[in-house]
Image (cartoon, grey):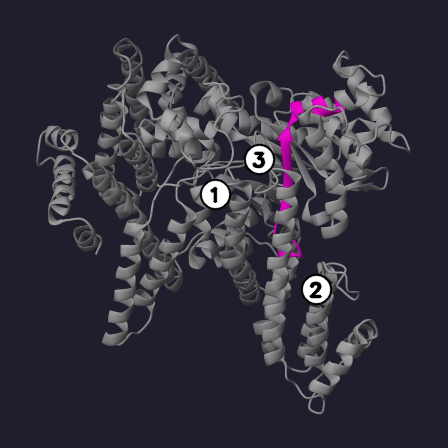
Amino acid sequence: MLGEVLEAQTSRSAFELVESVRTGAIGYRRGDVDSRDGIRRTLSDLRGGEASVVARAFATYFELVNVAEERERVRAVREREAAGTLLDSIPAAVDRLAEAGADAGTVESVLADVLIEPTFTAHPTEARRKTVKAKLRSVSRHLDELDTRRLSPAERADVERRLEAEVTSLWQTPQVRDRRPEPTDEALDVQWYLENTLFDVVGSVYDRLERALEERYDEPVEVPKLFEFRSWAGSDRDGNPYVTPETTATTLERQREVVLGRYRDALKRLSGVLSQDDRRISTGRGVEERIENHGERLPGVASEAEERYPNEPYRQLLKLMRERVDRVGGVRPGAYPDADALLSDLDALASDLRANGAGTVAAAHVDPLRRQVRTFGFSLASLDLRDHRANHTTAVSETLAREGIDYDAMEEAERVDLLTEAILEAEPIVDATDTEGLSETAARVLSLFDRTADWQAEYGVDAIDTYCISMTEEPSHVLEVLFLADQAGVVDLPGHSGLDIVPLLETESALDGARRIMGTLFENEAYAAALAARGDVQEVMLGYSDSNKENGYLAAQWSLHHNQKRLAAITDDHGVELRLFHGRGGSISRGGGPMNDALLALPNETVTGQVKFTEQGESIAEKYAEPSIARRNLEQMLNAQIRARHAARERPTERVDPEWTGAMETAASAARVEYRDLLESDGFVPYFEGATPIAVIEELNLGSRPASRSGERTVEDLRAIPWVFSWTQARCILPGWYALGTGLRAYLDDGGDVETLRAMYERWPFFRTTLDNAAMALARTDLEIAAEYAEVADADLRERFFPRLREEYERTVDLVLEITGRESLVDRQWLAENMDRRNPYVDPLNLLQARLLDRSHLTDAERRTLRLTVKGIAAGMKNTG
């Protein structure tokens, strides 16, 4: 269909040009031709708009084939569900617990511990425009119709005509954004997935769990709240000057409007179902009292309900409930004070229906809404605030300076003492509302805390109750946030703290200093009081991205793993419950990979049941755009977390052979030295600039946040996303494997043996996951394509660095295959076939991009084509960064 549209919208010669490139690329991959010289000549000779046509054709192909593969995933899951072969399903998790001897009480205790918190971020890794995504969702719906409905020939022809119309429209639509998205755009994008997919599918996940428990256990097992969705979109200020308090206020308001609208619609539908006549049923006192109580608040509505629905008590109550929902956020009295009040009414309805022998009605119609209210509350998704610790220090320093206190001149211990004393004071020592004379940074920070108090009063504390501190290095960095929150009235110790304050540990020094940082805080009188007010749960965020960029893949993975165990020991020593927040990206180097594997590979000491992780960029669309796949992802997460928590209760401490940890220490240390030596080698940054499209990526309108923190081009200052994105585009996914081979070889040269590494791979989930994820990054790397980009770089730099990268790649591949015992890097047949199918279609985009990068002067049309190749390669690789 795309070929037909291409020819109709351009010309026969354009179609034949694309076909010649496509067949040439396939022929080379199949070994039918010996070189890519023919494709190179074709691409070099492109005239006028031909390059744009080629780039658009292959980019659009990937957009469409990704939707087709999504449909195949749905088919495969359905078939395996029917066959009972899904090992990571919810019934499979319940079966595992039962087979392990867990009784109903044990299962209930495990579930009571579990809380899974996917956190959607607005990081600039989504290359597709919102308009394009909407068209692709329409294509997906048409494919679903063709795939699942029994259609007459006329109906099928109609769907196919609409499908062709959508493909035509997609071809005619600009693929690259003309403007940079604003934070409110990003917030709306995240909101779409919450409103249109997750709101509907989360109930079915609970339903599957309850059904599986009923089938396995004779005793009832209570299922608590297991999911909570959170978001940074519209509230993450780290390095993004465009996220203002107004942005956050707008996001909170829109999210509340959306979720209340969904509740109103659901209550309206319920009213159509619950038409029971009180002359046929015996309404319990609970329902009658609620009608009376709500009627006292809303006498006019109560009269209308009684007149409209005589002898129909459920409908009368639902009418009053709809009115109370409708008044939330407005000035009229009688609104529900919070989501718990709405949930209480729904609980009463469900209980009364069951008492009247209508349990199936309650299960089919009321219980799904109860689960939604319990999960989404009145906020849809709770917002996390985030900012860089330097901004807090600036704000504290400037406000204290007005009181004659020289905060800048103080040592760390002095700062801790000062902040502690100020927080414990009954009255504020600074005016958090007065920003007169402050720098722009300090004024923005103070304004944020002042507005946070207002937001919590308006939307409830749960709507915005977490504050994450980027680049935390000292205890004072955490106490500064507590101080600012206290001065603004968000915190009022000892009884109230409106924030979970979350240090983000992402540098080697911060991770290694975790005991000093967290121990100082736990023993601090003010912080201990704040923690007690939040239930003695300490959330700590681990930064996978910056840790990898600083230390390299293997060293970062090992540092994060053993420092998680260290954090668990610290919190255990102080009687505090740990909740880890995994700052994962979509790529392997940034903590990506299958989420269920990652959850099962966590050290037992850290598996408290509560877990939080970021969902970023195109991985959000891949996981949550299609309802069946969204449900599947939630089920996999729940399967893994239930199993992991049960294992942790049975074996609270991970038992690892000391020889294995010694091997990792040796390998990780050597890997870090090699990685740092590469980054610090003279000329590496210019090579990186020449051998990747980093300059183009920095100019793309991918997200509202700048690509670097200060605007400088250094590896240290560059954000992790464009760093990974650039290498991914050039098909040299260095962040996902570089120095792994050197590290493993160092262990072997130090007296280690391959058999030990094989045993580690077979029996240690952490090491197996580390190697499997690296194998995926290695498989997606194509050094022959990467060499095309290296040709663009300075010749001297190319000769210095590309052979080094090739040597490390080959060393790593050899060792990974030797340790895993596999013949190929990819051990899943479907995945190998997927890559074989995609590679010939990505190759022309890479070759065209490299040709354009090699030109010193580009026309406006060529620059647009270059940006389009970036977007097409991202779709082909199904990853940006």
Cα distance in 3D space between marks 1 and 3: 31 Å
Image position, residue 81 (x, y; %): 40, 61
- Depth check: 601 or 764 in front? 601
Distance CA(mark 1)–CA(mark 2): 31 Å
Q: Quadrant of residue 384?
A: top right
- Residue 609, horizontal then vertical, whole percent: 62, 45
Could you say whether the residue bearing mark 3 is in a helix, strand or loop? loop
Amino acid type of the residue that numbered disc 3 sits on in the rendered structure: Tyr
Please rate how many residues cluster around mark 1, counting C-alpha atoms within 10 Å: few if below 14, some from 14 to 19, many from 20: some
Pointers 1 and 3 in contact (CB under 8 A)?
Answer: no
Tag 2–tag 3 contact (CB < 8 Å): no
Q: Earlier in the sequence, mark 1 or mark 3?
A: 3
Dot placed on the residue nearer the N-terminal end, 2 or 3: 3
Quarter of the picture containing the N terminus is: bottom left
- Look at the image and say whether residue 586 sits in the magenta stretch: no
Identify residue for label 1. Answer: 595
In front of the other: label 2 or label 3?
3
Asked whether residue 616 appears in the rendered view, the answer is: yes
Element type at mark 1? helix
Q: Are marks 1 and 2 in contact (CB under 8 Å)?
A: no
Tell me the element at label 2.
helix
User: Does 665 appear above or below 317?
Assistant: above
Residue 838 in the image: above or below residue 682: below
Task: Give the residue at mark 2.
Answer: 343
Q: Is residue 34 left or right of residue 195?
A: left
Residue 475 in view in this figure? no
